[in-house]
Image (spheres, grey):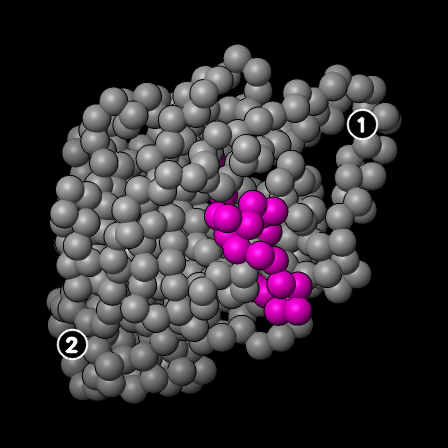
Amino acid sequence: MLRKFRAGLMLSAASLVLAVSSIAVAKPYKGAEVYTPQGYLHGRIEVRMRMARGSGILSTFFTYKDGSELSGAFWEEIDIEVFGKDNARSWQSNIITGMGTRVTSEEVHTADASLADGYHTYGLEWTPDYVAWTFDGREVRRTTGAQVGTLRNPQGLRMNTWSSDVVEWVGAFDDSVLPQHQFVNWIKYYRYNNGGFELAWQDDFDSLDGARWSKADWTFDGNRVDFDPQNVTVKDGTLVLSLTREGQTGFNGAVPRDEGTEPGTGAGGGATTTTASASSGGGAGGAATASASSGGGAGGAGGAGGAATVTSSSGGGAGGEGTVTTSSAGGDAPGEGGGIGGTLDEELSDAGCGCVTAGASATPSSWAAALAVGLSALAMRRRRTRG
């Protein structure tokens, strides 16, 4: 995945504002991106998402070292990129490093069903020794060695929906499917500490935390869309990233419910919850009491069946009622601690997770770079293109 860049010219603030404004209205399609200005060094990130569908469209979560795109800078990035083509059944894991010539390690994984038809938990584990990707709590790839060792700096967390113009990679764009949306139920960040992971924070997107997230308002070469802040919406406990035509930005539809078993079921949470003590669950039925529970979804604390009492549970069954004590079982996806199963990338089997590795991609990959906006001179943060 080689990339070419144009260094941003240092213009006066007024001139650059006009330049950025002209870029923003130059493209007929609008996408969305959120990012954390804060960087994180190592850790585990889990994101519960339902992706966009349509040829030419990408839905992503990735980590990125700010300034990687600048001349003379060393690029550092770890990717999860879901292809909208072929009914959104495949996604790509990747690491990008290097100065000048980029080193990439792309692999494509295929799910049993469309990733646009339901929520799934996508995970990254980044340590000094390895990077691993998980899908619904099962490890589908792990990589070690020299490239991992070059990931030395904190990276911000980013999610976006966009359209690449590289047809051989993402498929031919069909704008008749617009609008399309990427739904994010929740995200968790675990810090890495002495060989283990500790939950540092979780965002259930009851609102958009302006201290944690910023909205992108730029574009880059090879991208059919401008990132428009109006295509970033929070509704019913869900972050919605939209891809629309110009003049049709925003999201006014119904948020699809997450029927999984993890916290923050989206679509409004529990409808009849009486007491939810230290619980991030909440589903269609709601729990009478959910004490210290991270369950949720179809049968856990706050699930469709609704448990009478759930104590210290991070799981949840399909209908479960009665009493569940100190249980971490349940459902398709892991509870608060996540889970690591599956195999290393030498075998690359699905290990029961519904993902099959198609192998390393020989084509240059996706993704890319931002426009950094300074106070005195609004400099382009990031521009990336395949080539």
Q: Residue drawn 36% across and 42% down?
A: 361
Cβ–Cβ under 8 Å for marks 2 and 1: no
Task: Give the number of the disc on residue 324.
Answer: 2
Residue at 79% across / 45% down in the picture?
A: 26
Percent across and percent down for residue 136 are 27, 60
Residue 227's mark?
Answer: none
Q: Which residues are magenta?
A: 154-183
In the image: residue 378, left or right of residue 212: right
Asked which secondary structure carries label 2, the reply is: strand
Residue 175 is at least partly visible in this image: yes
* In the image, residue 272 above or below residue 70: below
Determine the CA span between mark 2 and mark 1.
59 Å
The answer to whether residue 350 is above or below residue 268 is: above
- Judged left or right of residue 302, residue 166 is right
The residue sitting at 63% across, 44% down in the picture is: 223
Tell me residue 165's x, y (percent): 61, 47
Amino acid type, callout 2? Val
Give the image location of residue 141, x and y in percent.
23, 46
Please name which of the two marks, 2 or 1, marks the residue nearer to the observer.
1
Location of residue 77 with respect to 353 vertically, above or below: above
Q: Residues within 10 Å of mark 2 (few under 14, many from 20)?
A: many
Q: Earlier in the sequence, mark 2 or mark 1?
A: 1
Mark 1 crowd level (few <14, some 14–19, many ≥20, 10 Å Cα): some
State the mark number for residue 16: 1
**Secondary structure at numbered mark 1:** helix
Q: Nearer the viewer, residue 78 or 272?
A: 78
Quarter the N terminus occupies: top left
* Observer-nearest of 242 and 259: 242
The picture places residue 44, in percent across and down from the top left corner, at: 30, 43
